[in-house]
Image: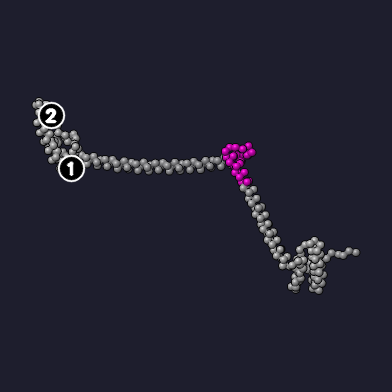
Amino acid sequence: MGRGKIVIRRIDNSTSRQVTFSKRRNGLLKKAKELSILCDAEVGLIIFSSTGRLYEFSSTNMKAVIDRYGKAKEEQIGTNNATSELMLWQREAASLRQQLHNLQESHKQLMGEELSGLGVRDLQSLESHLEMSLRSIRMRKDHILKSEIEELHRKGSLIHQENMELGRTVDVMSQQKVELHRKLQASEPRGVADASSSTPYSFSITTQYADVPANLEQRQSQQKEGDRRKELMAPELGLQLH
């Protein structure tokens, strides 16, 4: 007759629980020793009883086994982290590839290509999207043109003001020129003023004798008289005569 299965749960009776602990502890230690011998494995076993008592078994040295366990655990964690990070980047790359594919399809559809697979609703949505894009483009273009026109108006106004200022300057210079010409005429002797009325900034005295023949002495005396008049007039007018 076979042995019945024992339900795996906490034993309520403390005596029975202690007996079972001793039997199974010894069996576990025996199995650990047999495993290390038969399979040439490095085994470390640590048991704490309910009362806090320590039981242990080590095929070599318990501290060496614990150190080896710690290093192996760290390597395992590092490998798991690297694997997790690799999987994360793979998922990210796959998502980016899908986004790129969707953008390429959308771009082709906006350019009027590959529309055979779209239905009426998709085409209407694409049409609305294009109309909104065109409105935005026109608004931006109108804004730029308006700004350029305002800038041209501003520059035109500045140029007009500069022209008006230059015109006023020219008028002032013309008035000064007329005034200077009047002063020159007022300061000259009457005969010289009549002769120089057509040339306000230079003087030339020309004597013509239509009926009386001229001789050399008369011309020399007239030339000297003209030179003396120029020398007398030059300091008063402040002009360099040539």
| Image side of residue 61 versus residue 151, left or right | right
Q: Secondary structure at mark 1?
A: loop
User: In this figure, which residue is indicated by the disc labeled 2?
Assistant: 208
37 or 186, which lies in front?
37
User: In this figure, which residue is indicated by the disc labeled 1?
Assistant: 238
Q: Assess whether residue 114 is covered by the magenta stretch.
A: yes
| Image side of residue 95 versus residue 60, left or right | left
User: Which residue is at 14% across, 38% downward?
Assistant: 230
Q: Main secondary structure of the magenta part?
A: helix
The quarter of the image holding the C terminus is top left
2 or 226, which lies in front?
226
Instruction: Determine the image quadrant of residue 195.
Output: top left
Q: Looking at the image, do the residues carrying marks 1 and 2 touch, with CB atoms under 8 Å apart?
A: no
Question: What residue range appears in magenta?
Answer: 97-124
The three-letter code of the residue at mark 2 reads: Gln
Measured from the top left, where is residue 139 in percent x and y? 48, 42
User: Which residue is at 79% across, 64% downward?
Assistant: 36
Specify whether residue 191 is in view.
no
Measured from the top left, where is residue 15 in percent x and y? 81, 74
The quarter of the image holding the N terminus is bottom right
Q: Assess whether residue 12 is covered by the magenta stretch.
A: no
The three-letter code of the residue at mark 1 reads: Gly
Instruction: Determine the image quadrant of residue 100.
Output: top right
User: Which residue is at 72% across, 66% downward?
Assistant: 64
Q: Secondary structure at mark 2?
A: loop
